[in-house]
Amino acid sequence: MKYSDDFEKKPSEQKEEQNRVEAMLSDLDKDGINDLDQYVEDIRNREIDQTQRLSVQLKLVKDGRFAWLQKIGIILFWYLRPILYVIGEKTRSYFRFLLGVLAASWGVLVESISPITWRRTVKYEFKRSLGQVVCGGFFSTFFTATLAGLAVVSQAIFWLGAAGLTKMTGPILITILVREVAPILVGMILLGRNGILTVTECSLLAMGGQLKSLTVMGIDPFITIVLPRAWAFTIGSFTLGMIFGTTSLFMGYVVTYALGTMQDSIWTFYSNILAAMSVADYVLVPLKFIVMGFMIGVGSCITGMNVKVNDEPSTLLPKGFTRGIMLIMMVNILFTLDF
């Protein structure tokens, strides 16, 4: 009896389902298909209008000896415009990022002057970020500086001594290691160890809606997140840079002294290095570490906070690393021109 009742209800249910599907199709035919036809018609009208504009531009070309070259150029430019649009969009995206970093950097400098900015939450975030930058990057910096001392300093001292150019040891080490190699390696350590972590952290806050929640509560995310991290990266970069330079020179001296290449004491060696530095070196080398750390901190925060809907960790992290490397090279080139 039960199965017979179900069998009797089944045709009626099928009919209701069929009527519902027909109603949906009629609505789609009334709304969607007509709109689609109108969209296709608009595309055709746009193509006809563009063709007419091309013919008008060709007719405006004055007759002359090189008129045919001008017409060929107009036609090539007309059909290459989609490619040029793509190239221009990518170029504008990079310039947009650089302009955003410059604007955010100016905002950090302006907001840092006000004592109201440094509230308890901002101070706590600054201390936490500074601890992550310095403590987290200390061992990586020390290990990299040791390798640089063994590979760069010891080899430079050895071969300059063999060539009888011992007096050139200080200027060459200052030029190669202190001015060029140390800032780039410290910047890459800072970016790989803390910059990518900042990109991930800020992107999770943006995707999770915490940034909007802070704004609703009357808390400025720029002051709470970007400002303390920017200054933490700045101080951390300067600290790690001094550690890198001192450690690499010391390790290079130890190796060459153990091999018998270097006969001077450690204090004489450091005195010769400091004597080879000019007044500009004492100002520009620390300033190079400071600016590089500041730009990496601001750039990492901006990359993470400006996350898009279709961004994923597989695309966001390479973007953050590429932008960080670009900032490092730009700062290095800028200060190289000053030297």
Image (cartoon, helix red, strand yellow):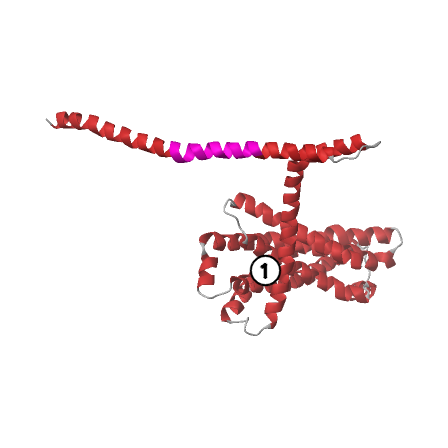
Q: Position of residue 55 (x, y in %)?
A: 69, 32
Of residues 84 and 182, the one nearer the viewer is 84
In this view, 198 is above or below 86: below
Can you identify the residue that label 1 sits on? 133
Of residues 93 and 275, the one nearer the viewer is 93
On the image, which quarter does residue 149 sit in?
A: bottom right
Q: Position of residue 108 (x, y in %)?
A: 60, 65
Q: Specify the amino acid type for callout 1.
A: Val
Identified at 52% across, 55% down, the residue is: 202
Q: Position of residue 46 (x, y in %)?
A: 58, 35
Identified at 53% across, 69% down, the residue is: 123
For label 1, the SS is: helix
Does the magenta-highlighted stretch encompass residue 200? no
Q: Position of residue 234 (x, y in %)?
A: 64, 63
The stretch of residues the image draws in magenta is 29-45
Q: Residues within 10 Å of mark 1 (few under 14, many from 20)?
A: many
The number of numbered discs placed on residues in the rendered structure image is: 1
Taking the view exactly as shown, the residue that stands out farthest to the right is 164
Taking the view exactly as shown, the residue that stands out farthest to the left is 1
Residue 72 relative to residue 38: left or right: right
Quarter of the picture holding the N terminus: top left
On the image, which quarter does residue 216 sit in?
A: bottom left
Q: Is residue 258 visible?
A: no
